[in-house]
Image (tube, helix red, strand yellow):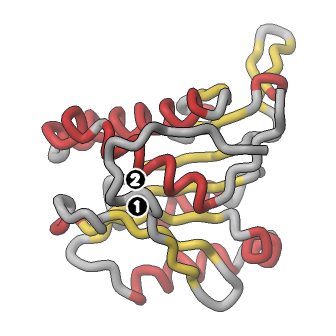
């Protein structure tokens, strides 16, 4: 099996494609937070399938971990994932996203992706608080250099807009903003990441 190296741009593009393809299922459960989170996990499952990755939910208390099949191990009747490709968390509560960001810092993965929401428009103060948490980690410099800590935010009051999702990659002294490049191509077929 080929090694999948998923960049933050790859992830946000594939996530946007899968999200918009599933809109008929997602939008009716928008205000039902548990059902909505299940739909976000289904979006992640599409990304996993398109890239021939395994997926496990609630492993190490995360919403989802994507992994290469050869990195899943059974030892003494226990399941282990070694070297995850993506560690994913979806947080409905804009105040609790800080917990999820801190939780990601405990794990080791090729890419960290946290999806959350901000009431009204996303502002610098909100992003500064998330940046402050990451910058205190001993792996902050590595995360900044690799560009593999991705925050995807949507503004709760603007969820019907086509530019709803905005991505931010952690850098040492700022956030690098990322937009899905597939935003206007809702029905586009999900394609695997090349190695």
With 55 as the anchor, is 167 left or right in this view? left
Q: Are marks 2 and 1 in contact (CB under 8 Å)?
A: yes
- The N terminus, quarter of image: top right
Instruction: Using the rendered view, name the quadrant where residue 148 is placed.
Output: bottom right
Q: Is residue 185 above or below residue 139?
A: above
Helix, strand or loop at label 2? It is loop
Of callouts 2 and 1, which one flags the residue occurring earlier in the amino acid sequence? 2
* x and y, in percent, of residue 159 in the image: 21, 60
User: Tag count in the figure?
Assistant: 2
The residue closer to the viewer here, 188 or 158, is: 188
Residue name at image x 66 percent, y 91 percent:
173
Q: Quadrant of the C terminus?
A: top right
Instruction: State the image quarter where residue 68 is shown.
Output: top right
Q: Residue at x 56, y 62 (%)?
A: 101
Is 127 on the left-hand or right-hand side of 111? left
Query: Would residue 151 be found to the left or right of residue 68 on screen?
Result: left
Q: Nearer the viewer, residue 65 or 105?
A: 65
Of residues 19 and 145, the one drawn nearer to the viewer in this rendering: 19
Between circles 2 and 1, the one closer to the viewer is: 2
Residue of label 1: 96
Instruction: Identify the secondary structure beneath mark 1.
Output: loop
Instruction: Give residue 8's quadrant in the image.
Output: bottom right
Please name the residue that numbered disc 2 is placed on: 91
Q: Is residue 31 above or below residue 131?
A: above
**Residue at horizontal 25%, vertical 43%?**
33
Horizontal arrangement in the rendering, residue 20 relative to residue 174 (left or right):
left
Residue 106 marker: none
Position in image of residue 121 (x %, y %): 26, 79
| Badge 2 density bin: few <14, some 14–19, many ≥20, Cα 10 Å | many
Image coordinates of residue 163 in percent, x first then y, are 30, 68
C-alpha span from label 2 to label 1 = 7 Å
């Amino acid at each position: 099996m080929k090694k999948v190296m998923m960049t933050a741009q790859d992830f946000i593009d594939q996530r946007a494609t899968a999200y918009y393809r599933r809109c008929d299922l997602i939008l009716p459960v928008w205000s039902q937070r548990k059902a909505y989170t299940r739909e976000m996990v289904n979006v992640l499952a599409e990304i996993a399938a398109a890239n021939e990755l395994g997926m496990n939910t609630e492993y190490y208390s995360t919403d989802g971990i994507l992994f290469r099949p050869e990195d899943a191990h059974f030892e003494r009747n226990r399941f282990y994932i070694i070297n995850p490709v993506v560690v994913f968390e979806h947080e409905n509560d804009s105040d609790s996203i800080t917990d999820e960001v801190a939780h990601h810092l405990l794990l080791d993965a090729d890419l960290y992706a946290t999806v959350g929401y901000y009431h009204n428009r996303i502002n610098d103060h909100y992003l500064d608080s998330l940046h402050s948490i990451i910058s205190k980690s001993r792996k902050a410099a590595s995360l900044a250099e690799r560009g593999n800590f991705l925050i995807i935010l949507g503004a709760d009051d603007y969820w019907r807009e086509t530019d709803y999702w905005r991505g931010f990659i952690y850098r040492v002294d700022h956030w690098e903003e990322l937009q899905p490049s597939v935003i206007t191509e809702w029905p586009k077929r999900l394609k695997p990441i090349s190695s």
